[in-house]
Amino acid sequence: IDGDMGKAQILFAQIEHYTLGGVEDDGIMKIFVNKESKDKITMIINQLDYKSLHLTWNTIKNENWHLMWKKYFTPITVGGVIEILPNWNYDNISHKDKVFIRPGMSFGTGHHETTYLMIESLIEYSGNRFSLLDLGSGSGILSIVGHKLGYRDIHAVEFDLECKDDFNFNLNINECTKNINITWTNALKWKNFNFDLVIANIEKNIIKKIITNVKETSTRFIFSGLLKEDREEMIAHLSINNFSIQNINTRGEWIAINCKKNEN
């Protein structure tokens, strides 16, 4: 996608549920999708008014996928506490403050604003020895960060089996396979919210359904995968479902909502 990068990011948010992820490269937004999703994505794009964007399609070979990311992946540091590095930088030394990720089909690398916001939230509550539920865990990056920060009883929930290889690889390289439990199921079917902190970095409509599913609990929730333009809609939905919002953090076009279910 070539053109207005602000609109390109918003367009990406509209179709992200159907994509494998995206990167910006020299003023061009590159969005990666499976061939099976192309028709659905094209239909969504045609319904939107983004005349200032120029869209082109290209095909890449699946076997070049991980190698391609060496061009785009640069280490990042969040809050001066956690550094996210690609797996090819692994030096066989245990680093409490470093998380190694294999960039791949699940795209959880920390570079996206919503992942960054969630890591900031995990840093904020670190030191409390909280139990942690990671809904829509993808590559496992947030669960791994939680482990590095001292969270306990970490449970990840993911539906997309495309993430499985990357998830297992990332847990293994970060030496936390015994510290993080994974359930491969739909997050909407998950009913146990008996954790100190629940995080969900997923698509807006799924988050709204999760909120509706939550019954009596004193759990703190942090939701992201949300655009700034979703703010008022989410505030209203949380209020209707008896949630109190503590704060809303912003990064770029994206927000993360920190909230708790009210006790009746």
Image: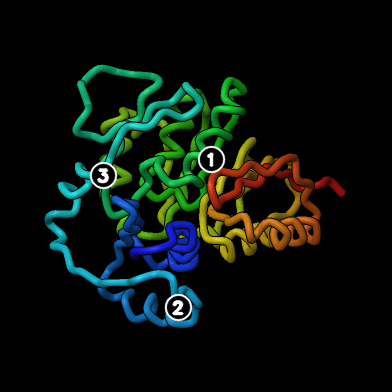
Q: Amino acid at mark 1?
A: Met
Please name the residue shown 43% across and 57% down the image.
5
Q: For mark 2, give the secondary structure.
A: helix
Rate crowding at label 2 as few (under 14), some (14 to 19) or many (20 or more) other CA atoms within 10 Å.
Answer: few
Q: Which residue is mark 3?
A: 72
- Regarding residue 52, the answer to whether it shows in the image is yes
153 or 208: which is nearer to us?
208
Indicate the colouring scheme: rainbow
Q: Position of residue 110 (x, y in %)?
A: 41, 40
Q: Which mark is residue 143?
A: none
- Image height of 64 relative to 55, above or below: above
Q: Quadrant of residue 62?
A: bottom left
Q: Amino acid at mark 2?
A: Ile
Q: For mark 1, give the secondary structure.
A: helix
Q: Which residue is mark 2?
A: 44
Q: Position of residue 75 (x, y in %)?
A: 32, 32
Q: Which residue is mark 1?
A: 118
User: Which of the marked residues, 3 or 1, is nearer the chain's N terminus?
Assistant: 3
33 or 55: which is nearer to us?
55
Q: Position of residue 45 (x, y in %)?
A: 43, 76
From the image, which quarter does the N terminus lie in?
bottom left
Q: Nearer the viewer, mark 3 or mark 1?
A: 3
User: Which of the marked residues, 3 or 2, is nearer the chain's N terminus?
Assistant: 2
